[in-house]
Image: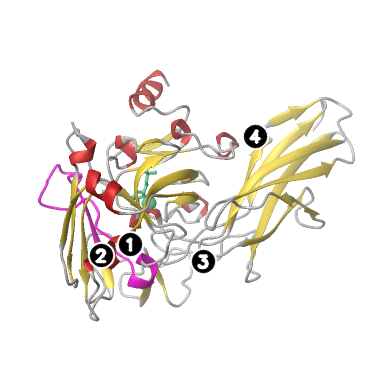
Amino acid sequence: MQDQTDTLGRFGKDRLTILSETPFVAETPEALLDDETTPIARFFIRNNGLLPAPVEDPDAWRFTVDGEVEHPLDLSLAELKSHFPARTFRMVLECGGNGRSFFEPQAEGNPWTNGGAGCAEWTGVSLRDVLQAAGLKGTARFTGHFGADPDKTGSREKQAMSRGMPIAKALEEHTLLVWAMNGEALPFVHGGPLRLVVPGWPGSLSQKWLTRIWIRDREHDGPGMTGLSYRVPVHPLPPGSDAQSVETRILESMPVRSIITAPAHGSRYGAGTRGIAVRGAAWAGDDAVARVECSIDGGATWVPARMAPPRNRYDWVRWTAEIALPGDGYYEIVARATDSQGRAQPFRVVNWNPNGYGCNLMHRVAIRVGEGG
Ligand SMILES: Nc1nc2c(c(=O)[nH]1)N[C@H]1C(S)=C(S)[C@@H](COP(=O)(O)O)O[C@H]1N2
Ligand SMILES: [Mo]
């Protein structure tokens, strides 16, 4: 335990759950996501490789835009800050594998529960403004992202991860080149001095330590784009199938998810408690959250939650629900969010896939009231 606390402390983190030491990966227990804006100390970390060399002068950090553009760019962070209008949005960043641990049989990859997500205030410029300055050619179809981190063997030749997105996603106002998080200089472990934040889509698109954006005339094919990475079978598979040769499609928007951030799993209440306030957060990829409901009887009856309006698109919705308890005993609270297209979270995992993407099972929290139960 002490070792874990020391490791987390080195990254400025408080009580996260370490899923992997090298590369370093840590998630946030749901009950620690109870703040409106996730503090940096509680924001999850996902590295696919090793950390790049420390940076002396953040404003001197350089990155390039090349490929299918009229005017290739080579800009320092200082130039980026002075040439383009800054924007701040509060937006969810979520790992594509969030929820993976709920698949049976266990899928390949880090066993995230629901804590591979957080919602921070990101400050930077719209990638769109920079691409407009570069002048996209008619042949521009896709981006390819490059970062300074060596891969897990320590090789600087190979990218730890290099993903990309269709140009339409790159041109959304909320797709940002970011240098600040919650009003502070972007921490090194979160990709500082400069990263992408591509909200609503798998976190792997949000390249950290960004050095280059390559505009391509076809789908990008860097590490993380091919094979079964960030892909799911087109036709649903029986759980546990060998999927090496099945037809796949690339993941885009993340599915709707809600988490209960209070009470914490395992909370106890005094005998005679007959009502409690449940709190949480919900988000839905590119979509909006239409409603959130809670149940203590396995979904037989539902209590609607009150939702606070999101600050901007891609912000999470904070919600509260008043739950009546019929007597002392043991209860399991579940939360279910529904997106604006009517898609709700399932009770059971139905979309098993070998790399474990897209699991948005309802979050369940057990509580006890009184001595019994
Ligand atoms: N350069 C680089 N960028 C990266 C990664 C990486 O390994 N290297 N991991 C990606 C993945 S899979 C996720 S989920 C997010 C996590 O961002 P965070 O560590 O700031 O929470 O960063 C993405 N950007
Ligand atoms: Mo991720």
Does residue 51 appear in the picture of this structure?
A: no
Task: Give the magenta-colored segment's residue range.
Answer: 144-170
N-term-proximal mark, 1 vs 3: 1
Q: Exactly how many numbered labels are in the figure?
A: 4
Residue at disc 3, secondary structure:
loop
Q: Which sits earlier in the primary sequence, circle 4 or circle 3? A: 4
The type of residue carrying mark 4 is Ala
- Residue on which the image places disc 1: 129
The picture places residue 129, in percent across and down from the top left corner, at 33, 62
Residue 303 vs 245, above or below: the answer is above
Of the numbered discs 1 and 4, the one sitting upstream in the chain is 1
Disc 2: which residue: 133
Q: Mark 1 and mark 2: span between their CA atoms?
A: 6 Å
Q: Residue furthest bottom?
A: 138
State if disc 2 and disc 3 touch (CB < 8 Å). no
N-terminal of the pair, mark 3 or mark 2, is: 2
